[in-house]
Amino acid sequence: MNGQDYYIPAAAMAISLAFKLPALRHNWRDPLLRSVCALLMLAGAVFAFAAPPTIAAVNRWTGVPNISAPLVYCLITAFSASCLVLVVNWRGGPPEETRRVSRRWILGYSIVIVALVVLFALGDAPEERLRDLDTHYANAPYIREMIALYLLAHNVAAVVMVAMCWRWSLQVRGWLRVGLMIIVAGYMFNLSYDATKMTAVVARWTGHDLDFLSTLVAPPLASVGALISAIGFVLPLVCQRMSDNWETWATYRRLGSLWQEVQISAPAGTPSVRMAWWSAAELRVIQRESDIHDGFLHLGPYFDRGLRERAYARAVAEGSDEAAARAVADAAMVAAAVQARSADPEGQVIGAGEETVLDTADGPRDLLRISHALRHSPVVQAVRQQAALSGSGRP
């Protein structure tokens, strides 16, 4: 692999991190978001500093032959810890338990990082090796232990990640399950990387030469595994956000029928709230719900409880369940009240029915059902036609 093969994944990680930084700035205390950003940053750093041109540059700048080796190993170890911490925070649970487990992984891998630095300092690796340090110094005192330690730490993290994500994927559905299965696939490549690296190193210990496994086979496996794993981590978060936004916009659109229906109830001269085109979907839904509830208040004097009860009974008779029948009854009462309000331009209440307030205890779901019934229920259409013919809003 040449430098480009390392720098392209590093750039991809940097771009992903750039998209996450604004959210991190506004939600710094979110442990899941911090974990995602740490993972993307460390993954990009691993690729950037593991590239042979970067290895040569770091060695040259520091004047220490092979100083890049412990640097890259420490970054790989930190990346392994960040993956474990991310899964712990992602899965959730009691906050104290989550923090305790995260601290244990961080502490354990921090000790490994310190040990890697100490072992390199104690060892002797005078000849610069850009691609085959693992096998070239496989029998050198202390350097040998440093190589084995980083491979062992990486392998432990890979095994734990596969086990955790596989078990978790059996308990969930949707994008989360897809992401977890992608992570498992990515870490299978990481396990293959560990296996090829360790095989080449052990071969050196036993007097054999399988260096090609370390220099030619392992690096592509690590690159593919890291990219796949990163996709698995990011995909569910991105897709869930997109799904949430889609649902919010769908709610906004589905409330349109009810919102338009009650607009007539607004007093003359009431200023309409205009929202900027860039306003968030959640804010638009809140404003639309507020407009609808304001409309209910203005239509209240025209609501007919008896009409609602008759519409409810008819909807039940036609096979609607309780929730749907209640929505049909409320929609019929709203439609009749709108007709009554239209026939009363002076604002004098027609009829003597007492003011009724719609029961929307379920929040937006009730409003959505009422809005749907306004457009699609035959009961509501019949009430609307009869109210229009009578000119009084009373069938």
Image (spheres, rainbow, N blue to C red):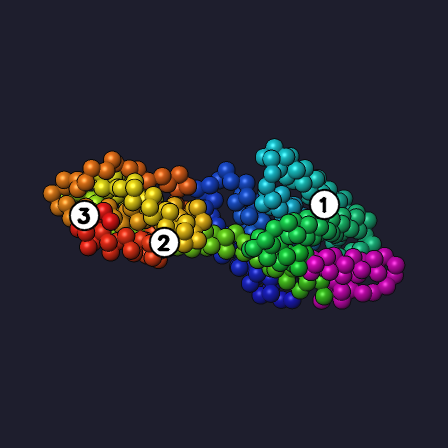
Whether residue 226 sits left or right of residue 141 in the image: it is left
Q: Nearer the viewer, residue 163 or 130?
A: 163
Q: Gap in Å between the C-alphas at discs 2 and 1? A: 64 Å
The answer to whether marks 3 and 1 mark residues whose Cβ atoms lie closer than 8 Å is no
Mark 3 against mark 1, which lies toward the viewer? 3
Amino acid at dot 1: Leu
| Residue that appears at 54% across and 40% down | 31
- The label shown at residue 341 is none
- Crowdedness of circle 3 by 10 Å Cα count: few (<14), some, many (20+)? many
For label 3, the residue is 392
Position of residue 235 relative to residue 95, above or below, is: below
Q: Residue furthest top?
A: 96
Q: Secondary structure at mark 3?
A: loop
- Report whether residue 293 is seen: no
- x and y, in percent, of residue 97 in the image: 63, 35
Mark 3 against mark 2, which lies toward the viewer? 3
